[in-house]
Amino acid sequence: MIIDLRKFIRTEQPYWDELEQMLTRHQRDPYRRMAFDEIKRLHYLYQRASADLAKLDTYATERGTHRYLESLVSHAYGMIYGAQQKAVRFAPVKWFWRTFPGAFRRRWAAFALSLAILLVGGIFGGAALVIDPEAKAILMPFAHLLLDPAERVAQEENAGEYDRLKGSKGTFSAFLMTHNTRVSILVLALGMTWGIGTVVVLFTNGVMLGAVVADYVRAGQSLFLVGWLLPHGAIEIPAILLAGQAGLLLAGALIGIASAKPMADRLRAVVPDVVTLIGGVALMLVWAGMVEAFFSQYHAPIIPYGIKIAFGVAELLLLALFLRYAGRGVEIKD
């Protein structure tokens, strides 16, 4: 076939430019949904460019134009017929409102097991302290917890208007967030030990918590204990349990109880929920860290215990309602 090459390129160049512009828009925003007319136009331009490429194959002198058109056609082919999985735009509101609580509800049995392990550890720690008060240094390896509860409460309540965290609340809050997040990630990661490490960390945290509760209750300082722990603990402790839930999920996939699927398939099935849970844990710990630094550390008469307890109860109730009901049958638009 004989064609006027200059006229051919001049005539077809606008169509090539239009196709290139469509491909560029798609590369810049692969999540954008194309209208039906736009899709038809893309397909037409692709077919036209492919036909033009076939016509240019016989012209060795136009290698630059040939390479350009070949690249254009290959990119258009990949966009139209590519087997890549459709990209999904991350929608934070939808993730928080639907994906996170949905993952929790879907894997509730692992959460129940995580809670049971912590409670067993708590019972053990409380009983151990009651039986042997001298074990306090082993059960609660933190300096501020080794004080006599009544002595500590007196110090805290007699501090008056003195702000011991003045100028350092932000630093203390950031420390709490990062420390607790590291612990949570550790609880999750130890699921790779077939769950043994996850169980140990949950149990030991339960032991410490149970020992603290027993120590303050025995000393008659229950009101201070609840007012101190509940505001941040209402979120922090469930966050640790959710991390344990994720770690136990991972362990279950490795062990493969009641599943004949290959390990790779089992892991592939739980990884999205594991990642979702630990992401939710990180958000919860950010809130818990701020509450502990800016609220929990201040006691009566600065902040009455009734206000602190009411705040903690409200947090716990809202969290329970959120995990139980959030996102059920509700469409969240991006």
Image (spheres, grey):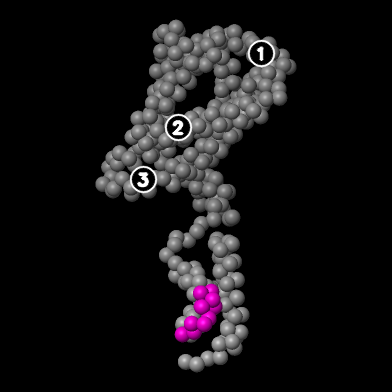
- The amino acid beneath tag 2 is Leu
**Which residues are the magenta region?**
58-69
Count neighbours of disc 1 (C-alpha within 10 A) and say few if under 14, some if 14 to 19, many if 20 or more: some
As for residue 64 lying within the magenta part, the answer is yes
Q: Which residue is mark 2?
A: 186
Q: Residue at x 44, y 70 (%)?
A: 81
Which one is in front in this view, the residue at disc 1 or the one at disc 2? Answer: 2
Picture quadrant where residue 333 is located = bottom right
Q: Residues under labels 2 and 3: Cα distance? A: 18 Å
Q: Residues under labels 1 and 2: Cα distance? A: 35 Å
- Considering the whole magenta stretch, tell me its main secondary structure: helix
Q: Which residue is mark 1?
A: 157
Helix, strand or loop at mark 3: helix
Residue 160 at x, y percent in the picture: 71, 14
Placement of 290 over or under 31, stated as above or below:
above
Residue 29 visible? The answer is yes
Depth check: give the residue in front, 50 or 164.
Answer: 50
